Image (cartoon, coloured by chain):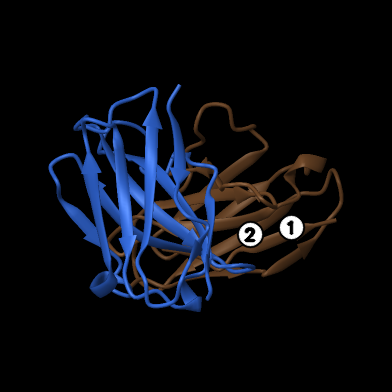
Chain colours: A blue, B brown
Amino acid sequence: QLQLQETGPGLVQPSETLSLTCNVSGGSISSSRFYWAWIRQSPGKGLEWIGTTYYTGSTYYNPSLKSRVSMSADMSKNQFSLEVRSVTAADTAVYYCARHPGPKEGPDAFDIWGQGTMVIVSS
Amino acid sequence: DIQLTQSPSFLSASVGDRVAITCRASQDINTYLAWYQQKPGKAPTLLIYAASTLPSGVPSRFSGSGSGTEFTLTVSSLQPEDFATYYCQQLNSYPFTFGPGTKLEI
């Protein structure tokens, strides 16, 4: 059964770079069947899609964050990563990674989520 | 960006009640809409995709309907474990967006 687990520092200094990794077990991120996404949720707020990556290296970012965000994948470690540069307190949130099946490969939605990791931006 | 609105924002109900939550999109998204349930301190879980399809394992008391710009999530008979926050999401086009959520409480 596929499982996703976010890892990374829980505290980041303002203006620094937030780096998170999503470790995938029970399935391969190099499969053409799935896309892989990052979503965040600020305390007490709703959900915000950050971006999506595909095994080809294609990436799709939310324009609201595009200038500060990059995503990558390490097929050898079966993990994908997120970087958010020049963070401020507004980037404090729970960060989730999730799977998004491709066309005809499953639900057209984020069908499996990691448990989430809280990141606080503070000095 | 496609904006999603949900109504109501809060919904007070009792076990056994039938409730409905509406999600409206700022433009036509066909049936590229999903619904998620989120309980405090937990990740969202997928309830419905393609506006009306239940993934395996989701109880049949949940149903979804709609297309275009107006969608509805219905719970036919509320169970204690259904008290949570519900979000809609459009996957018609990037950037994917979520609705602001509906908190269903007793």
Residue shown at 59% from the left, 69% from the top: A45
CB-based contact (under 8 Å), mark 1 and mark 2: yes
User: In which quadrant is the N terminus of chain A drawn?
Assistant: top left
Residue shown at 42% from the left, 73% from the top: B3
Q: In this view, does B98 lie above or below B18?
A: below
**Label 1 crowding class (10 Å Cα cut-off): few <14, some 14-19, many 20+?**
some
Q: How many marks?
A: 2
Residue shown at 70% from the left, 61% from the top: B103
In screen coordinates, is A110 left or right of B43?
Answer: left
**Label 2 crowding class (10 Å Cα cut-off): few <14, some 14-19, many 20+?**
many
Residue position marked by numbered label 2 in the rendering:
B21
Residue B73 vs residue A26, the one in the foreground: A26
Residue shown at 60% from the left, 64% from the top: B101
Q: Where is residue B32 drawn, in percent x and y? A: 36, 52
Check the residue under mark 2 and report the chain it is in.
B
Residue position marked by numbered label 1 in the rendering:
B104
